[in-house]
Image: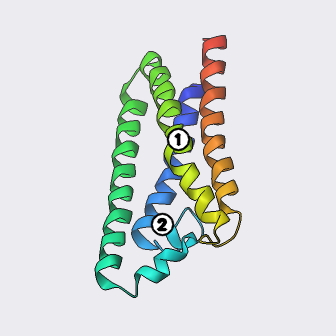
Amino acid sequence: MNILSIAIIIFILLESLNVLTLYFNPGSQIGNGIGVFNAWEKSKADPEMHQFVRYLVNWVAGTKLIFIALLLVILFTAGEATQLLTVVAMIASISSFFWRLNPIMKSLDAAGHITPSGYSKTLTMMIAGFMGIFAIALVWSLVTG
C-alpha cells in the first residue's frame, strides 16, 4: 500500500463518518453535523423551510457518498498514476471551500449564528488538514516514487 492509498483511505474514513452524521444525526454539533448552525433549530419552526434544509443536508450527504464510492473504485482498481492525479484533484476540489464556504462560515460565526462560537476556525483547520494530508502524500509519492 502506497502513501497515496493511505491518504485516500483516511479521507474515506473521515467522510464516511460525516455521511453517517448527516444521514442519521444531522442536528449534531460533532462530526460536521449541521447543528452548529443556529438556523437548523430555527428552521424547525417552519415545516416547509425545515423540509428544504433537510433536503439540502441529504443532498450533501449523497454527494459525499458519490465521492466516497469513486474513491473506493480508484483505491481498489487504479494504478499509482491515477491515484496521484486523484490526490491532485482532491486538493483542487477541497480548496473550493476557501473560495465559497469559508467566507460564509466566518461571517455566520462573527454574527453569532454558529454554536459553538469559533467553529469556523475549527472547520478551516480541519479542511486545511485534509489538504495538508493530501499534499504531503503527493510530495512524498513524487519524491520517493
What amino acid type is highlighted by mark number 2?
Thr
- Residue at horizontal 59%, vertical 71%? 113
Q: Quadrant of residue 30?
A: bottom right
Viewer-proximal residue, 33 or 53?
53
* Vertical side of 90 occupied by 126: above or below: below
Mark 1, other Cα within 10 Å: few <14 / some 14–19 / many ≥20: few
Query: In which quadrant will I find the C terminus?
Result: top right
Location of mark 1 (residue): 99
- Which SS class for mark 2? helix
Give the percent coordinates (x, y) of residue 44: 40, 84
Give the percent coordinates (x, y) of residue 25: 46, 73
- Which SS class for mark 1? helix
Query: In which quadrant will I find the N terminus?
Result: top right
Location of mark 2 (residue): 21
Side of 36 where 22 appears, left or right: left
* Vertical side of 1 occupied by 94: above or below: below
